[in-house]
Image: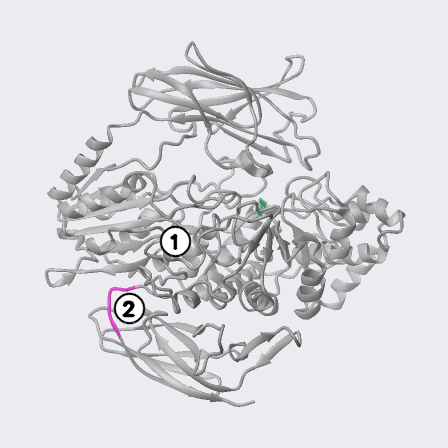
């Protein structure tokens, strides 16, 4: 609860504001910030994405940030304390960049692996999501920076994400989709929540009175701000009455003048506006930008070494799904002093460190698996080959390009010339100094390209408007480019359009010019200039690539194949239709495994992929999107300097067809959650299909025996013994199974977990407190939680599918 001084400062600021100032304060002044109101001593409050780093207000490599592993990886640590430390690091980054409110964490559910933002959310289980999300919020906010828990609620897929109406039963909504939000609001008290784009049961989330005012504020006591998702608002009166405090971005939004006019017309009572302004002022006070109000945090936590923590989290998140014996020992870890390694895969050189969309940040540097293993192994012990390309799609022009942009007005007067770090131009809200959006007419991206390889280089364009693309003396394209969907953020997603090829020689520079006259989108709340010059290297002969990799694998003691998804596979803005690895990577793994029985496959993907070869290789290590220290962490784990500590936060299916939900295409605008309570392991538990790897699964470098479980009231203690030969860490999981499960209800649910460490031969005891909610189910007829006395089995073990200990308990009224 806030202290008196804060509440007084908020009230005395509020009374000084007229309606115009109040309604201006409820909308962005640009893409990322609220207006300052000097008359009340209020500074501008700055927001930034979230969740794996703090991008800041510029979308550019010029403004780098620490890049943590993907949220799926964070959840795979099953370690709230570690995640809280990541939060402290993020707050440190936010303060460095002048950011007050982080647009994270994403706590939507893994309803299906096809969800495009699966990598950005934590788990298929609401309890694990709530525990990890709470820790993240606690960590960030302990550093004096706010969090915006998103996207409230049921934003579990991307198809038609702005308009889809998700139809969810009261029980599924309460017990699965709202549950992590409820835990986080009650336990960690976030300063803000972001409303989702979608509708739930017929009402769009930025105006959902029942969910925002009724449940979030009324039942759970949320006292923070509700912030809209970007361009996710629909109507002025609906939003303010429905519970939305801040409309983002601005300066042209449904609030501001439109809200003042609605008050003047008597459609909205000014007291409703006052309530929203109070909450924004409270947020500002907490963040330390309201004069006279003490900030929530005045002494910051000790500085965190960002790179060391990022490396540690990555190691702790890697899930060793399989580690088969070869000879008398499992293939991993390898003996660094005495093993030759054939490292294979494009992603081993060009590591995939994060997923696509608004979660993107620009790390200062990235350690690839090739860098990491080169440093970890003796000279001459490592070979590298590409093996297979990942996709035929084009990326933004980067390597070998030296580019600048010249901005002109309609008369051809030069407004500004500036250097570009790549062929991607993303100016949102704030344009580079000296460029006035209204005056800006044409941008010329020009410079040189010096190819690394000779051959046929392809070039392309991405954006909305008119383009002329010239390479050397060839004009490859002259014409208009339009958007292909209704998603206004399409400008940021997807690949450039291929406009043709030019034969170029390695090392010989060529002039490149892309002239672009952007279409200025009518009614857009912000000023946007977003377009790219695309480029694709000449493709090498796929057969030859594969043959080289197979040959290298034959020559080495161990083959390490890094397979990956691409930005065109895992991103915000669209969903997947298949879980296959792109390109010929499956064939690559199969052929390498046939050539070398000690083949280790590292899966560099933020969410599940099909692995048809998984039983034919010696080891499978899931590395998620590991963040900027990817290769260093991978080398640590492969050579055994660290144990892979992760456990699956979500089931990895053998094939998409086996999954409980396989399609997220709305029908007539509606997406019905027909599976009800049965997502994740709740569904797999009643299915005939067996997943590739179950929820909770993950091996370390030692082994464990589950020796005993005891209960004392709400406290459960579990004793495990390290039966292997090295010290290790185990994630002890407790599932609760009603002895006579009611029809239509899952057989079991995760109700607790704890990590323990022990040396060889030693025992350790995990202590887990059972939450009261474990014995409750939602009763819609009474609109309350109903306590369920009766007999339950506490099932304890290392995964949802492996529960060696059971303790029968009786719960009384
Ligand atoms: C995303 C949000 C993000 C916002 C700002 C939206 O498209 O859904 O998660 O915070 O953009 O980048």
Residue 618 sits in quarter? bottom left
Residue 389 sits in quarter? top left
- Residue occupying the point 89% across, 47% down: 264
Q: What residue would you read off at disc 1? A: 308
Say if 702 sits above or below 487 in the image. below
Is disc 2 surrounded by few (<14), some (14 to 19) or many (20+) residues within 10 Å? many
Q: Quadrant of the N terminus?
A: bottom right
Q: What residue would you read off at disc 2? A: 728
Q: Is residue 311 left or right of residue 120?
A: left
Near-viewer residue (108 or 55): 108
Q: Decide whether the magenta segment is chiefly helix, strand or loop.
A: loop
Near-viewer residue (339 or 720): 720
Query: Does 402 lie within the magenta span?
Result: no
Percent of width and height locating residue 224: 68, 60
Question: What is the distance, in whole Å, between disc 1 and disc 2 at their CAs?
Answer: 20 Å
Magenta region, residue range = 699-704
Give the total number of marks visible in the rendering: 2
């Amino acid at each position: 609860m806030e202290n008196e001084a804060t509440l007084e400062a908020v009230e005395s600021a509020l009374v000084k504001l007229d309606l115009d100032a109040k309604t201006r304060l409820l909308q962005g002044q640009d893409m990322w910030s609220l207006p300052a109101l000097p008359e009340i001593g209020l500074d501008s409050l700055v927001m930034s994405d979230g969740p794996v780093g703090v991008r800041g207000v510029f979308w550019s490599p010029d403004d780098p940030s620490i890049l943590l592993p993907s949220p799926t990886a964070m959840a795979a640590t099953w370690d709230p304390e570690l995640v809280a430390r990541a939060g402290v690091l993020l707050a440190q980054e936010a303060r460095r960049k002048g950011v007050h409110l982080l647009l994270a964490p994403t706590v939507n559910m893994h309803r299906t692996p096809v969800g495009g933002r699966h990598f950005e959310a934590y788990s298929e289980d609401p309890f694990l999501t709530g525990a990890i999300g709470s820790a993240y919020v606690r960590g960030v906010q302990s550093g004096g920076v706010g969090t915006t828990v998103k996207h409230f609620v049921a934003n579990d897929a991307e198809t038609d994400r702005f308009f889809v109406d998700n139809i969810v039963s009261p029980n599924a909504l309460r017990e699965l989709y709202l549950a992590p939000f409820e835990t986080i609001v009650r336990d960690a008290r976030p300063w803000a929540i972001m409303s989702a784009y979608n509708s739930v049961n017929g009402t769009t989330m930025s105006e959902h009175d029942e969910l925002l005012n009724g449940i979030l504020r009324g039942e759970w006591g949320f006292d923070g701000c509700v912030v809209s998702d970007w361009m996710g608002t629909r109507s002025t009166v609906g939003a303010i009455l429905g519970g939305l405090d801040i409309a983002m971005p601005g300066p042209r939004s449904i609030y501001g003048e439109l809200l003042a006019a609605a008050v003047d017309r008597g459609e909205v009572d000014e007291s409703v506006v006052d309530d929203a302004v109070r909450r924004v002022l409270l947020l500002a006070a907490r963040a330390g930008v309201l004069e006279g109000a003490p900030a929530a945090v005045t002494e910051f936590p000790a500085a965190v070494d960002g790179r060391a923590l990022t490396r540690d989290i990555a190691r702790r998140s890697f899930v060793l799904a399989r580690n088969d014996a070869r000879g008398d020992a499992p293939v991993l870890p390898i003996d660094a002093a005495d093993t030759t390694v054939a490292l294979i895969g494009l992603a081993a050189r060009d590591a995939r460190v994060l997923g696509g969309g608004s979660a993107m940040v620009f790390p200062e540097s990235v350690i690839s698996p090739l860098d990491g293993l080169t440093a970890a192994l003796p000279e001459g012990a490592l070979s590298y080959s590409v093996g297979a390309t990942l996709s035929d799609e084009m990326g933004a022009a980067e390597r070998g390009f030296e580019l600048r942009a010249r901005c002109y007005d309609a008369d051809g007067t030069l407004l500004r010339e500036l250097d570009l770090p790549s062929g991607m131009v993303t100016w949102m809200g704030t344009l580079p100094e000296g460029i006035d959006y209204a005056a800006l007419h044409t941008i010329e991206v020009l410079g040189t390209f010096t190819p690394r390889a000779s051959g046929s280089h392809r070039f392309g364009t991405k954006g909305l408007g008119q383009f002329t693309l010239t390479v050397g003396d060839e004009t490859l394209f002259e014409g208009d480019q339009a958007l292909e969907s209704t998603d206004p953020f399409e400008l940021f997603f997807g690949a450039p359009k291929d406009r043709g090829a030019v034969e170029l020689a390695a090392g010989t520079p060529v002039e490149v010019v892309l002239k672009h006259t952007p279409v200025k989108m009518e009614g857009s709340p912000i000023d946007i200039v977003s377009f790219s010059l695309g480029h694709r290297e000449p493709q090498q002969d796929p057969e030859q690539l594969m043959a080289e990799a197979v040959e290298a694998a034959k020559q080495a003691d161990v083959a390490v194949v890094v397979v990956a998804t691409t930005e065109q596979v895992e991103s915000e803005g669209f969903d997947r239709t298949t879980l296959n690895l792109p390109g010929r990577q499956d064939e690559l793994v199969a052929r390498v495994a046939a050539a070398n029985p000690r083949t280790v496959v590292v899966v560099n993907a933020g969410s599940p992929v099909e692995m048809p070869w998984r039983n034919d290789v010696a080891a499978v290590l899931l590395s998620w999107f590991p963040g900027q220290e990817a290769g260093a962490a991978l080398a640590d784990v492969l050579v055994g300097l660290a144990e892979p500590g992760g456990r699956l936060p979500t089931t990895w299916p053998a094939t998409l067809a086996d999954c409980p939900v396989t399609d997220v295409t709305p029908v007539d605008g509606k997406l019905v959650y027909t599976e009800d309570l049965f997502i994740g392991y709740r569904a797999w538990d009643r299915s005939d299909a067996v997943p590739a790897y179950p929820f909770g699964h993950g091996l370390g470098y030692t082994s464990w025996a589950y020796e005993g479980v005891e209960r004392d009231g709400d406290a459960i203690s579990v004793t495990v013994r390290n039966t292997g030969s090295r010290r290790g860490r185990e994630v002890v999981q407790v599932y609760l199974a009603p002895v006579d499960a009611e029809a239509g209800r899952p057989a079991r649910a995760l109700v607790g977990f704890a990590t323990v460490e022990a040396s060889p031969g030693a025992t350790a005891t995990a202590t887990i407190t059972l939450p009261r909610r474990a014995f409750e189910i939602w009763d819609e007829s009474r609109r309350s939680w109903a306590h369920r006395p009766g007999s339950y089995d506490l099932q304890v073990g290392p995964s949802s599918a492996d529960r060696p200990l059971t303790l029968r308990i009786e719960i009384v009224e």
